[in-house]
Image (tube, rainbow, N blue to C red):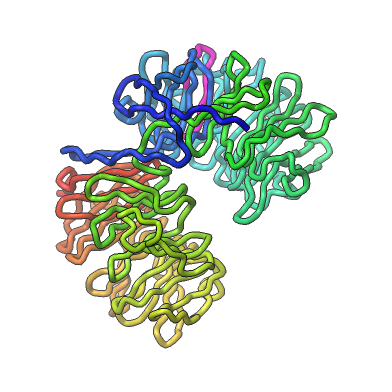
Amino acid sequence: MPVGTAVGVNQDAGEADATPHPQSMPELALLSVRDEAIQSWSDPNDIVSVLYAQGSIWATTSGGVVRWQPDMQAYQLYTMAEGLASQAISGLAQDGDGHVWIGYLDHLAWSEYDGETWITYTTRKEAVEARHTAMLSALRHDPLLWYSRPESDWLWLPDGEGGILAYDGKWRAYGQREGITRSTRRVIASDAGRVWAIGAGLSTAEEGERWWQDHSLFSDIASFDKVRDVAVDARGVWLAFAGAAGHSGGVAHLDYERNRWTGYLHDLNQAIPRQVYGIDIGPRGTLWLCGKGGLAYQETGVRWRRVSLPDMLVQCYDWLPDGRLAIGTGHGLWLSSPDSGGALDGPWVVPSPLVGNHVVALAMDGENALYVGTDKGVTFVKATGETGVLYAGPINALEVGPEGAVWVATSMGWLMARNASRGAASEREWVLEDGVLALAFDSQGTLWLCTQDGRLLQREGDRWSGVANVIDLAGASPRDMVASRDGTVWFATLRGIGSLTSEGEFSLATGEDRLLTDDVRAVALGPEDEVWLATAKGLARHLPSGRWTRFTTNSTEGGLRSMDMAHVVTEASGTLWMCTAEGISRRLSNTDWAYLDLQGATCALPASEGVLWVGTRGGLYRVETASLTLVP
């Protein structure tokens, strides 16, 4: 397949000129630190939605919104500096007035581009009440934002908290009590008035009905959190999904009247993408899919046909007025002309110092190089600002060993990088071929890790020894782990905090006794061997004496910004840093609290005196700690 020129662009504010150059690997920009209290960086090339609107190609990413001119010679990048509530975008629609709308992964807000500026509504209800008529006549719906059907005044939308809202001049709310499956994030309605809600399962009701029916069974979908898109036809609903690790995905169709599921899987039909990320039904009933390896389509009564784009993950697409396809991928925008033999031009990218935006881990090696782990890979940043890719692919954890080397836990195994900040590929090596979920070094420098099948391994020198199976003991996989000086290993899990002593005794603390919830997200070890837990319902501490203490937003007078926590990390001085749904919290050893409201924070790394690195779902932040607000 012919490949056209790639395009590199300048990330300065305003429209930038695009100059072509060859591109085969992600080309990372320098990370330049300025004298600012808060500075952020994102990767606006992981494209999740594409839309041709207002004479431009709009691409939404978890690192902002990019607006390309049709000739691809100039672009505009929109981030928080241009008025967005966050850079972690989720959803893209166009209302009847031609205005472009976006939603967010970490905010309940919506933003509207009216052709000149962004208008942000802090609540979805506020947006709907202000623009109800224009939304009803939408030129492009998005089930992540809102949906309506012809000849109806009802507007349907996810409430952002797992339920569904409807508005026709009056608000109606639907949740699990009414039969909605939990964690609902998408809603769609057929022309005939049947409404479908997709979350942890599939539920449906006629427009105007109060009670919903669950139709999740027999769908060929192993996990509904892998559903990537949804479409409806006259008979029922289509769900596009990716497979779990090591398994392919496909599409599933529910014929409502017959209560019959039909699956179309890559394993059974190679024309269907291996992982399906998008689905659309054309005006004449043609069904289009996109995903890993290209696109596929099926006309009514005709077998599936494939538009092959080898080695490419097509996450979204849209048709341009001239018949070309605008294709959004995990690394940039491509253009294709199906009528000319599949010629492919691209990628068009916005240079970025990162690979991916959903930051899941941060680390700093012995040479003060920063490592940023995302769901797309690991980027390293030298002290000079020079950047590079250490590993391409999702990771589970980063840890720094006693000699300053960085260790990377992945589903493929365990990668150790010696002085990887120098960019020398020969200094990276796979140490273990088993997938690794979590790891920790104890005070003696011994490495502990837990594999994907739950085996707890201890490494002394070059020798590995099996200790126990954490999944068997705790009933859940570990999310995080630490090893205390007395030889106890602690595991944060969905079922509580597990501890395994050096004598082999295991115990599990849950919400029924010492915690406010079983849902433990992260664990950290303090300088006095105290164990700190970040949970879904507040902060907890375990002292070596056995005493437990719980901290809430009320008991800390707002110092803890939210009970919904994601991460906790300690410093040798006893300072504690926490990431919550509403922002960053700091607790000094003298119990003084301070905070910074930064929604979507996922992890934190104190780097030097007065500087904190923060990972979010929308990129990387550098925060000068003097900008925190002290709790009186």
Residue 282, quarter of the rendered image: top right
Can you give x and y, in whole percent of width and height, for residue 585 in the image?
26, 51
How many marks are shown on the rendered structure? 0
Q: Position of residue 586 (x, y in %)?
A: 23, 54
The answer to whether residue 123 is visible is no
Quadrant (top left/top right/bottom left/bottom right) for the N terminus: top right
Give the left or right position of residue 341, taking residue 499 as reference. right
Q: Is residue 362 above or below residue 469?
A: above
Residue at image position (39%, 24%) is: 19
Q: Is residue 400 left or right of residue 609?
A: right
Q: Which residues are magenta?
A: 90-100
Q: Position of residue 312 (x, y in %)?
A: 58, 39
- Image point (51%, 73%), residue name: 470
Which residue is found at the position 28% from the left and 57% from the top? Answer: 364
**In magenta segment, residue 97:** yes
Nearest the viewer among 223 and 334 is: 334
Q: Nearer the viewer, residue 15 or 176?
A: 15
Image spot of residue 77 (x, y percent): 37, 26
Residue 362 can be seen in this image: yes
The answer to if 243 sits in the magenta stretch is no
